[in-house]
Image (cartoon, helix red, strand yellow):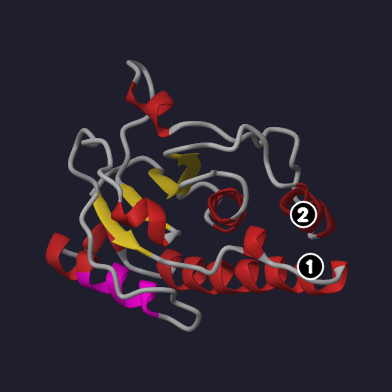
């Protein structure tokens, strides 16, 4: 595909929890090989405090994370994406922008921890579960031989990863 780090965009409607978590995981796990970004179709304007708490507790530097619109990435000078993943069913069903370069896409639906109700401990578990599922998928993804895999095989593998444990839908939307 490319001779530079792969640019990966994680999309979610609010860009306050799942997409931020995925961005953090891939930037740590894929350091040097991937550069992850996140955005939302209707950003909340702030990162969910439970997201920040979880990532802080796991040793991530959260100082640069913010909730932002996917429109920011349509501007000149922004990265061209090699891969785009939706991590919520709402974003998967929306009409996504046309991304230059025709990046590979997949839907990796994860239950929204921001919707969790209950005690603080129950809410924390919802965020930990989202982290665990995303971490597992991203670990499988980063192990793929991207530089030697053809586009059709890659698309198939990305969709398989999206069907791993915890999947919220069997979406096959193209973005």
Query: Compared with residue 116, is residue 85 higher up or lower down, i.e. above or below?
Result: above
Query: At x 48% / y 71%, what residue is drawn?
Result: 137
Residue tagged 2:
50
Q: Residues within 10 Å of mark 2 (few under 14, many from 20)?
A: some
Q: Magenta: predominant secondary structure element?
A: helix
Query: At x 77% / y 58%, what residue is drawn?
Result: 54
Query: Toward the viewer: 168 or 143?
Result: 168
Give, as a single range, the part of the protein colored magenta.
Answer: 156-163
* The stretch drawn in magenta includes residue 159: yes
Q: In the drawing, what numbered circle is on residue 16?
A: none
Compared across the picture, whether 107 is left or right of 1 comes to right
Q: CA distance from mark 2 to mark 1?
A: 7 Å
* The stretch drawn in magenta includes residue 9: no
Residue 59 position in % (x across, y down): 80, 54
Query: Toward the viewer: 54 or 155?
Result: 54
- Which residue is farthest top? 76
Residue 29 position in % (x across, y down): 58, 59
Residue 152 position in % (x across, y down): 13, 66
Query: At x 50% / y 42%, what residue is drawn?
Result: 38
User: Mark 2 touching mark 1, by CB under 8 A?
Assistant: yes
At mark 2, the secondary structure is: helix
Query: Toward the viewer: 141 or 168?
Result: 168
Q: Earlier in the sequence, mark 2 or mark 1?
A: 2
Residue tagged 1:
124
Query: Toward the viewer: 32 or 46?
Result: 46
At mark 1, the secondary structure is: helix
Q: Residues within 10 Å of mark 1 (few under 14, many from 20)?
A: some
Query: Compared with residue 140, is residue 9 higher up or lower down, i.e. above or below?
Result: above
Compared across the picture, whether 34 is left or right of 107 comes to right
């Amino acid at each position: 595909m490319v001779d530079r780090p792969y640019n990966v965009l994680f999309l979610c409607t609010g860009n306050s929890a799942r997409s931020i978590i995925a961005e953090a995981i891939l930037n740590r796990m894929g350091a040097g090989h991937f550069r992850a970004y996140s955005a939302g179709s209707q950003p909340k304007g702030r990162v969910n405090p439970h997201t920040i708490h979880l990532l802080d507790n796991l040793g991530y530097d959260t100082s640069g994370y913010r909730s932002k619109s996917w429109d920011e990435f349509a501007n000149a000078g922004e990265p061209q994406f090699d891969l785009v993943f939706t991590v919520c069913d709402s974003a998967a069903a929306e009409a996504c922008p046309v991304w230059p370069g025709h990046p590979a896409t997949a839907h990796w639906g994860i239950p929204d921890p921001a919707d969790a109700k209950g005690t603080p401990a129950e809410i924390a578990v919802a965020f930990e579960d989202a982290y665990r599922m995303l971490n597992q998928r991203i670990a499988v993804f980063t192990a793929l031989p991207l530089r030697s895999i053809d586009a059709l095989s890659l698309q198939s593998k990305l969709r398989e990863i999206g069907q791993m444990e915890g999947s919220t839908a069997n979406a096959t939307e193209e973005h």
